[in-house]
Image (cartoon, rainbow, N blue to C red):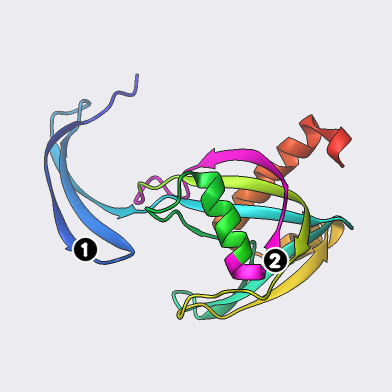
Amino acid sequence: MVKPWKEIDSDIEYSCNWFSVQRTRLLSPKNNVEHNFHHLLQHDCVNIIALTEKKEVLTVHQYRHTIDRISLETPGGVIDASDPSPLDAAKRELREETGYISDNWHVLGTFHANPAVMNNTCHSFLALQARKMADPDLDLTEDLETELISLPGIVDRIENGDITHGITLASFLKFEFFRIKNPELF
């Protein structure tokens, strides 16, 4: 039976605004051997599947320097310390990144983007009847362009590799489970 490993010690080796690198020495319950592991400690985040009245998905194109390409994804971002809840963060991120708002929100669920090396939790939400209310209010490091895509078009964009962002893909999986359980909303 798989058992938790025992922590011997840990320390922060590097820290910046976006993440910290933690080294943790753990003892294996299987063979009593100590091993060092490195983890990225990151802020929890939100991701939003926003559907308009016409059932179009609101997406954003954004340059991602780590992969050196424009990424097609759904709106989202870090939960700030000033956000009372993940839902409040989702509403803020949708409004800031796209200028859209919604009065009809649903929790899709949570997941861990990569628990092998990252500790954060992603909170995924569905915003129905999303509507444009203002221009985006982007951070200095953001340069986004929105695109509305039909639901069948999203499937095509995933299948042909246009959408590769892991958090976006996981949110669409959560969305599909939600649609199966709540067909009356669609």
Q: Residue at x 39, y 48 (%)?
A: 120
Q: Residue at x 64, y 40 (%)?
A: 108
Q: Residue at x 56, y 45 (%)?
A: 87
| Residue 146 image-quadrant placement | bottom right
Where does the C terminus fall, quadrant-wise?
top right
Of pointers 2 and 1, the one earlier in the residue sequence: 1
Residue 75 location in percent, x, y? 61, 62
Is residue 113 highlighted in magenta? Answer: yes
Q: Residue furthest top?
A: 1
Where does the N terminus fall, quadrant-wise?
top left
Q: Is residue 161 visible to us here?
A: no
Q: Amino acid at mark 2?
A: Thr
Q: Residue at x 67, y 76 (%)?
A: 135
Which portion, as a residue range, is magenta?
A: 96-118
Q: Which residue in the protein does label 1 denote?
A: 15
Q: Which residue in the protein does label 2 denote?
A: 59
Structural crowding at the residue carrying mark 1, measured as other residues with C-alpha within 10 Å and reported as few (<14), some (14–19) or many (≥20)? few
